[in-house]
Image (tube, coloured by chain):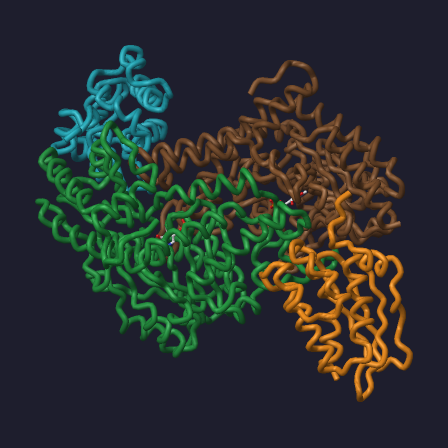
Chain colours: A cyan, B orange, C green, D brown
Amino acid sequence: MDACSLYDAVIVARSRSPQYAGTAKAETARAQGTNPLCGDRVRLSLCEERDGIRDLRHETRGCAICIASTDLMAETVMGRTKADALELARRFTDMLNSQSSAADLDDEAGLPGALQAFLPLKTHRSRLRCATLPWTALGEALKHD
Amino acid sequence: MDACSLYDAVIVARSRSPQYAGTAKAETARAQGTNPLCGDRVRLSLCEERDGIRDLRHETRGCAICIASTDLMAETVMGRTKADALELARRFTDMLNSQSSAADLDDEAGLPGALQAFLPLKTHRSRLRCATLPWTALGEALKHD
Amino acid sequence: MSISETDSLSHADLSHLRGQFPILSQTVHGKPLIFLDSAASAQKPDVVIDGMAEMMRSQYANIHRGLHWMSERSTEAYEAARSRVAEFLGAGSREEIIFTHNSTEAINLVAYSYGSLIRPGQAVLISEMEHHANLVPWQMLRDRAGIDLRVAPISDDGDLDLDAYSALLSDGKVALVAITHMSNVLGTVTPAARLVEMAHSAGAKILLDGSQAVVHRRVNVRELDADFYTFTGHKLYGPTGIGVLYGRRELLEAMPPFMGGGDMISSVTFEKSTWAPVPAKFEAGTPAIVEAVGLGIAIDWMESVGFDMIEAHEAALTKHALRVLPDVPGLSIVGKPKDRGGVVSFTMDDVHPHDIATLLDRNGIAVRAGHHCAEPLMRRLGLTATARASFAVYTTEHEIDVLAATLRRIRQFFV
Amino acid sequence: MSISETDSLSHADLSHLRGQFPILSQTVHGKPLIFLDSAASAQKPDVVIDGMAEMMRSQYANIHRGLHWMSERSTEAYEAARSRVAEFLGAGSREEIIFTHNSTEAINLVAYSYGSLIRPGQAVLISEMEHHANLVPWQMLRDRAGIDLRVAPISDDGDLDLDAYSALLSDGKVALVAITHMSNVLGTVTPAARLVEMAHSAGAKILLDGSQAVVHRRVNVRELDADFYTFTGHKLYGPTGIGVLYGRRELLEAMPPFMGGGDMISSVTFEKSTWAPVPAKFEAGTPAIVEAVGLGIAIDWMESVGFDMIEAHEAALTKHALRVLPDVPGLSIVGKPKDRGGVVSFTMDDVHPHDIATLLDRNGIAVRAGHHCAEPLMRRLGLTATARASFAVYTTEHEIDVLAATLRRIRQFFV
Ligand SMILES: Cc1ncc(COP(=O)(O)O)c(C=O)c1O
Ligand SMILES: Cc1ncc(COP(=O)(O)O)c(C=O)c1O
C-alpha cells in the first residue's frame, strides 16, 4: 500500500498515542478550534507564564493529521515565548499554504524537524486545515491575553 | 436576395394591402388575439348568421405573415358554416405544427390553395404563431356563441 | 452502444461501457483511478461531452425569442431535452418539467414559491435522513413564514419509521411532505408510493428528492403520484449546472413565480407584470441551454444501456460490497435498510474517515468522507463522519475487491 | 493567440481570431453565417469548448468536500476561476465573487437577500431602459415588501436623465439603485461612476447590471466603487449556465442567504443552521463547476486578445454601422446615446422587424427582433419592436456591409 510520506511514522505514532493529551497543570488559558466541515475539534489547555508557555495540553477529536499536529505543536511550543510561538504558527501555516512545492521549501522553512512531517500535505490541500486547526486555536488563545 | 417561398407574392401583396381590413357590417361578434412575445394583435369583427359566416373583417397590427394570414383566413372562411370554419382552423394549425416536412404534406393537407402559401413556415417554427394567431382568435370567437 | 440482452452486464459489455468514459482510464498518484464517488457526482460518457461541444461548435445561439436559424435550432434542442426528461420521468406533459440549476435550486423554488402559499400553523414534514438541500430550505421557510417543521424519525437500520410518519401526518396540518427517495448516506430507498399515498390521505402534497434515486431506478412520477420530484444532472451522467423540477401542472399553475426576469413574463409594464404559462414562468433568464441538451443526451445514453441492466448491475455490486466489506477487520457498515441502492457508508475501528479517504486516494481509490451534507443524520447515528463508497453503472466488482484489500492494509497500518 | 500590437485588429489578425470560433464557418440556408446576435449570446472560441470537454475527460469530480485527487483538482480549477473573475472585475478579494446561474439569478439573489433588509417606505430606483432581468425582480420585491419602485427617465436620444435621477434620489429614501451599465437595446453606456457617486451621496447602495458592458469594456468595480455588479457567462464568450455576482464584502456578510442547501452552511441541526462565510453562503448545492471553469477560460481568452483591441475593434464596427445603415432607405436607428457600445437597434419604414429578421435569416444573417426583454423601454420609445444587430470581437465590417445591402433588397421587396 502506498501510504505516501504524509502518514510518516511520527504522525501515525502521535495520532495513536498522543504524548500531550490532557489538561495543563496550573491552567491559565483555554481555547477551542473546530472545523465544522468535518467535525474535528481541538481543545487546548495552556499554562502561560511571563517568560513563555510553560505547559500545553490538548483534547483532540479528529483525524490522524489533526491529532498528530496538535501533539507535535504542544511539544514544539512548550518553553517558547509567546512571540516565538506566534511566529512559528505563522511560518507553519504559511509553509502549508504557499504555492511552492514541498521540495523548494524543505530548507527555507526553517521549521523544527518534527513539523516538516506535514510538508507532504501540500499535495493534499483538502487536508490542510486538519494540520493548521490547532495552530489557529493557539493563536486565538495567545491573542486573548 | 433569397426571400424564400415563405414571402410569396400573395403573402407580400396581402400584407401590403389587406382586402378584408375594417369591421363587419352587421357585426354579431368580436374577438381579439395577441402574441405578447412580439406585440402582434389581431382584432376580428364577424357577422355570423344561421347558415354560417356572412362577413369577417379585421384590424391587424403585426408582421407580414400575420396580416396576410388574417386576410387570407377572412377570404377563406367567409360563406362557410361554423363547423366548417372550425375544422379548417384545426387542419391549418395541425398542418403547421406537424413534424412532417412541407413536401410530404402538400397534397394531403387538402387546404384551400391560398393557405398553402404558409407551408414554408414549417422550417421557420419561431414564426408559426404569426400565422396561427388569427385562427386561434377565430376559434375563440366562434366558440363564444 | 449496444449491450447484449441478458439481465446483467457481461464482462465484455462492461469494459465496452467503461471505454465510453474517458476519465476512467486516468491514473491518480500513479495508480489506475477507481472512482467510487459517483453519488457525489457521476462521470460523463463521451457522447455527453462530445454532444455539448458539438452544439457549441455548430448550432448555438440564445433561445426562445430568436427568429433566426441558429436560435431555432438551439430552441428545438433545448425543448427536445425537456420532452426527453418528461418522458424519462413519466410526466403527464412536457410543461410539467422545469429546468433549474441543480436539485438544490429545484427544492428552493418549491420552498419559496409553493412555500408562500403555506399558512402559519401549517407544517412541512421532512425526515431524519435528508440531505441539507432538502432540509435547510424548509428551515428557512419556517423562520420566514412561521410554519412548523416536523421531522419523521428513522429506525436504527436506517428505514423511515412509517408509524411515526403516519402519526406526524394525522392532525391534518401538514401542507407539504418533503422526503428523499433515496438517502445519499445510507442508500435507503424509501417506499415512495406508500409515502405519497399516506401524505395524500392526510391532505398533504408531497415532494420527493430524487437526486439519488433517479440514477439507479426507473422512476415514474405519475405511477408514484408525486406532486413534485427533483433531480440533478451531474449525478445522472450529465453536465453540471442543470437540474430538474417536475411539478404537477395544476400546482405549478397556481404557484407564484420564484425569480423574475426575461422569458418568465407574458407582459411587463412598470406598474405590473403578468406571468408566462408554465414552464416558462419558472425559468427566468437565459437557461443552461447546452447543459439541458447534455442532460437529454445523458438520459438517451442511460436508456440505451437500459434501466433493467443498470438496476441489475448495481444490485449485484451492492450485494458484493455488502459481502466483502464486512470481512475487513474492524469495518462496520452504517445502516441496514430493507431496500438499498448502490451507496455504502462505513467506519473502520477508530481510524478517522478522513484518513481512510486520503490513504485510499494515495492508492487511486476515490471515496467520500465526512458528514455527506447530512449533519443531523450523522448526529442521529451517533457519528461525526463516515467513509462512503458509491457505485455507478461503470463500477466493477474488481474495484470493490481492491477497495476491500486496500482497507485491510490501511487498518494494519494504523493498528 | 497572438495579435500584433496595433490599436485595432488587422485583417489577418481578425481572420485568425475568427478561425478560433468553429461556428463561424457554418452555413445557414446555404449562405455563410453572419452572426449579428452576440448581445443575446456570444459564440464560444474553441479553447472554451475544448477546455470544458477536457475537464470532463480527465479531471472531474464534485468539489469542496472531496478529499481525493480528482475532487481536489476540480476544486482548484473552480476556485481558480473565481480568482480569475475577481481579477477581471478588479474586486477587492476573491470572496466577493459569487457564481450564479446567470445574470438574472444574480439580480434575484440581491433582490431576495439584500431586498429583505429594505424597509417599507424605502425605495429601489431603476431606469426606463432596464432589461426585464433588472426590473421584474424589483417589482416582485415591491409587491412582497411594500417598498417603493422609482423609475429614472431617459432622454429621447436614449441617455439617462441625470437631473431626474438626482431628483429621485434627493429625499434620501432610496435604499438601492439598480441600473444597467449598458443597454441591450440602445447600446447606451451609462456614466456608471457618476451614478455610483450620486447614489452614495444620497445614502443609497447601487447595483450595476453589467451583462452587456463587461463584454465590451474593461470594468473595474473598485474604481467604479460599485456595491454590486452582475454579469452572465454566455454573453462573454463563455458557457451557458454560469453567471456572476460581485458584492462588496461587508454587504455580503450582512446579508442573509438566498437559497439553502449543501455547502452554504457552517453547521446544521434540525433546530437551527449557521451559515458558511462568503462566498459559500450564497452558493447552495453543487455549482456549475465545469461552466465556471469555462468562464475562466473565456476571460483568459479575452485578455489574450486584449481589451484595448476589443474596444477599438468594436468602436470601429459601431462607427461603420452608424455610417452605412442610415443610408438604407427608410431605415432609422433607434437612439443616439452619447456613449454607445456595439449594439444598434433599428426600424425600416413599416416593414415589421420580424419580417426583417426572417428575411435576413434566409440570407444567412442572424439578428434579433422584438422587444428584447425591455417592454417598458419599447413603450417609452413608442415602438412595439425593433430589429437589432449586435457586434462581437469576431464581427467584420464586411458583414455589416452585407447586412446593409440585404436590408436594401428587403425594403425593395416590400415597397
Ligand atoms: C442588460 C441585460 N441584463 C440582463 C440580462 C440577462 O442575462 P441572463 O439571461 O443571462 O440572465 C441581459 C441578457 O439578456 C441583458 O442584456
Ligand atoms: C439526496 C440528495 N439531495 C440533494 C442533493 C443536492 O444536489 P445538488 O447539489 O446537485 O443540488 C444531493 C447531492 O448532493 C443528494 O444526494
Image spot of residue D132 (x, y percent): 68, 50
Residue sitting farthest toward the bottom: B50
User: Which residue, as the protein is rendered here, is positioned at the far right?
Assistant: B25
Horizontal side of residue D192 vs C237, given as left or right: right
Position above or below: C404 against D318: below
As drawn, the residue found furthest toward the top would be: A107
Vertical order, C263 against A43 (above or below): below
> Closer to the camera, A109 or B138?
B138
Residue D5 appears left or right of D370 = left
**Most foreground residue, D373 or D227:** D373
Residue depicted at x 61% and y 44%: C61
- The answer to whether residue C389 of the structure is visible from this angle is no
Where residue C9 sits: x, y (%)?
24, 52
The picture quadrant for ligand 1 comes to: top right
- Is C363 on the left or on the right of D120, as rendered? left
Does C195 sit above or below residue C320? below
B108 and B67: which is toward the camera: B108
What x and y, as percent, mark residue C119?
A: 51, 70
